[in-house]
Amino acid sequence: MTVDVETDEGLGGIGYTTFNGPLAPTLKHAVDQLGALVIGEDPLRTEAVGRKLRGAAWGSGAGGIFTLAFSAIDIALWDIKGKALNQSLAMLLGGLRDKVPAYASGALLRSYSLDQLLKSARVLVEKGYKQMKTQLALPGETSPRIETERAHRLREAVGPDIDLMCDINQRWSVNQAIDIGRRVEDVHFSWLEDVTAHDDYAGLARVADALATPHAGGECYYGITPFRHAIEARSVDIVMIDLFRVGGIANWMKVAGMAEAFNLPVVSHLIPEIHVHLVSAIPNGLTVEYMPWPLLRPRRAQALRRVSEE
């Protein structure tokens, strides 16, 4: 869902957000309602606009439809600011680096057979990717032995020099995460991601403390406050921020600063065309998730889905 914000000086900005499922029309309505409130405001005063919109919707809380809608408008305002000042977003935010690493995501799915998985991994290596993410918590009949064997076979397929990440998508219990996590420590995953329920801060802290492999989490957090809870609980070793759920660019940067204060690296969740700017602007930016879903044309999307068949 895209939103166009126009100014009286002829500059325009584009923002976007997403929500899958039957509430998508509700999200559009929320974007329209919030958009009506910003008419007449100075688009360069992004914090002032943000305070006005949060004040107007204070009863809705920091999460859900409001934050997703707010993010779309915030992104559009930063687009206007960049055009007005003739600067890229990365430069507006500090311009620390002009290059950041990215990892291939979405091509090594848990739904693939082992043969499909290994073939897709080899294709990514041939294409030159140095970092890539897979998934465990396999569907159907599985076990710690099967999960562990799959992880080891994948490592053998890509070799020792590829950075491998692994997403669990909150599908394990705390005890399963500790058990299987210990079994795959010699795979040397760069991180295990969202190993159990995202808001079980104590449980996630148990896992993070028990494993040598870092735990990455945060993509499901709305606003900035849950990140404080997660960091204070020591439940994340790597902070993952979703631009839409955190509440736009300004909030993303606030969370990145919070993570820096605790000596924690930051990684992105989806939306690589914007996140490359954000990760490059901060000293603790680690890598960018490359999964270009939102802006793909159908033909390109079809080609990416067939990566395992090449």
Image (tube, rainbow, N blue to C red):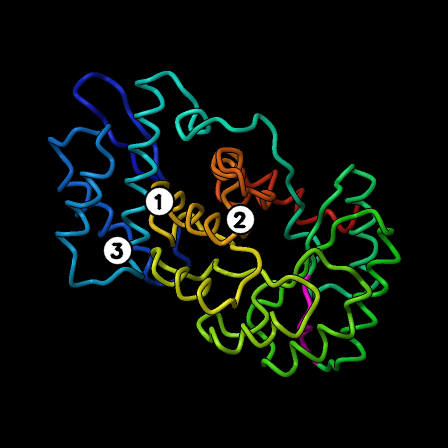
The disc labelled 1 sits on which kind of residue? Answer: Gly
SS of the residue at dot 2?
Answer: strand
Dots 2, 3 in contact, CB < 8 A: no
Quadrant of res 98: top right
Determine the main secondary structure of the stretch shown in magenta: loop
Report, in whole angstroms, how far the alpha carbon at label 2 lies from the one at label 1: 16 Å
Task: Pick whichever of labels 3 and 1 is earlier in the sequence.
Answer: 3
The image shows residue 171, relative to residue 8, as above or below, that is below
Name the image quarter holding the N terminus.
top left
Residues rendered magenta in the picture = 135-140
The disc labelled 2 sits on which kind of residue? Answer: Val
Please name the residue shown 72% across and 76% down the image.
Answer: 180
Q: Nearer the viewer, residue 302 or 279?
A: 279
Report, in whole angstroms, how far the alpha carbon at label 2 lies from the one at label 3: 24 Å
Dots 2, 1 in contact, CB < 8 A: no
Residue 136 included in the magenta stretch of the image? yes
Task: Pick whichever of labels 2 and 3 is earlier in the sequence.
Answer: 3
Dots 3, 1 in contact, CB < 8 A: no
Percent x, y for residue 157?
87, 55
Tag nearer the camera, 2 or 3: 2
Q: Which residue is mark 3?
A: 66
Percent x, y for residue 274?
47, 36
SS of the residue at dot 1?
Answer: loop
Q: Which residue is mark 1?
A: 248
Q: Which residue is mark 2?
A: 266
**How many residues crowd mark 2 within 10 Å: few (<14), some (14–19), many (20+)?**
many
